[in-house]
């Protein structure tokens, strides 16, 4: 893991299945270390960790032949958390509804759904070297008003 700038981290992993939980755990630990824990952040962290799992899995599954490394970037700031996964494969995937008979193919639709439900966004962009970056951005929860308590 590399701290690229204030509020920005990069995790470079070999494009293999074992990297998925490793990257997810690094992101979880970074979120925890930045204080994004507890009930207030539960939906955010659950959503982000699922997004990381889906995006890294997609890169490992579909891009490994042309991209032996996968880079995950986590940015925290400006009221949002953004996670991006970059690989060197030129194919630009699309979020599509898949047949109920299929066991896969729903990952990007799930990422899009999580991001939009949280009030965030996601997209796919080309990189300068012909690969792609798939990213999702989720807003940080607003602070509770001073003196108020959430029942729970």
Image (spheres, rainbow, N blue to C red):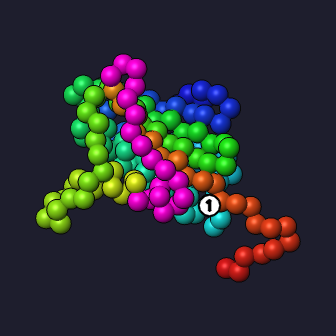
Residue occupying image coordinates x 28% and y 28%: 89
> In this view, which residue lies farthest toward the top?
129
**Quadrant in which residue 101 is drawn:** bottom left
- The crowding category of the residue bearing disc 1, from other C-alpha atoms within 10 Å (few below 14, some 14 to 19, many at least 20), is some
Q: Is residue 134 left or right of residue 96?
A: right
User: Is 114 located above or below residue 26 in the figure?
Assistant: below
In the rendering, at what x and y percent does residue 40 appear?
65, 65
In the rendered image, which residue does mark 1 sit on? 41
> In this view, which residue lies farthest toward the bottom?
151
User: Is 2 located above or below residue 31 in the figure?
Assistant: above
User: Dot 1 lies on which element?
Assistant: helix
Q: Is residue 99 magenta?
A: no
> In this view, which residue lies farthest toward the right?
147
Residue occupying image coordinates x 47% and y 55%: 115
In front here: 95 or 7?
Answer: 95
In the rendering, at what x and y percent does residue 129 appear?
36, 19
In the rendering, at what x and y percent does residue 122 appear?
45, 47
Q: Is residue 46 visible?
A: no
Residue occupying image coordinates x 36% and y 57%: 110
Count of numbered labels shown in the rendering: 1
Residue occupying image coordinates x 29% and y 46%: 94
Q: Which residues are magenta?
A: 113-130
User: Is 102 located above or below residue 128 in the figure?
Assistant: below
Q: Is residue 129 visible?
A: yes
In the rendering, at what x and y percent does residue 85 appear?
42, 37
Q: Is residue 126 magenta?
A: yes
User: Which quarter of the rendered picture does the C terminus lie within?
Assistant: bottom right
**Quadrant in which residue 114 is drawn:** bottom left
Q: Is residue 35 left or right of residue 134?
A: right
């Amino acid at each position: 893991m590399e701290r690229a700038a204030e509020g920005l981290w990069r995790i470079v992993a070999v494009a293999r299945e074992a990297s998925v939980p490793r990257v997810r755990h690094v992101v979880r630990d970074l979120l925890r270390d930045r204080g994004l824990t507890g009930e207030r952040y539960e939906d955010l962290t659950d959503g982000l960790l699922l997004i990381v799992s889906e995006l890294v899995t997609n890169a490992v599954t579909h891009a490994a032949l042309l991209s032996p490394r996968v880079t995950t970037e986590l940015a925290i700031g400006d009221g949002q958390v953004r996670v991006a996964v970059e690989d060197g494969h030129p194919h630009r995937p699309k979020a599509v509804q898949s047949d109920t008979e299929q066991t896969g193919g729903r990952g990007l639709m799930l990422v899009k759904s999580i991001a939009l439900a949280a009030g965030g966004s996601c997209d796919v962009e080309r990189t300068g070297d012909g690969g792609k970056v798939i990213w999702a951005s989720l807003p940080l929860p607003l602070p509770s008003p001073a003196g108020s308590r959430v029942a729970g």
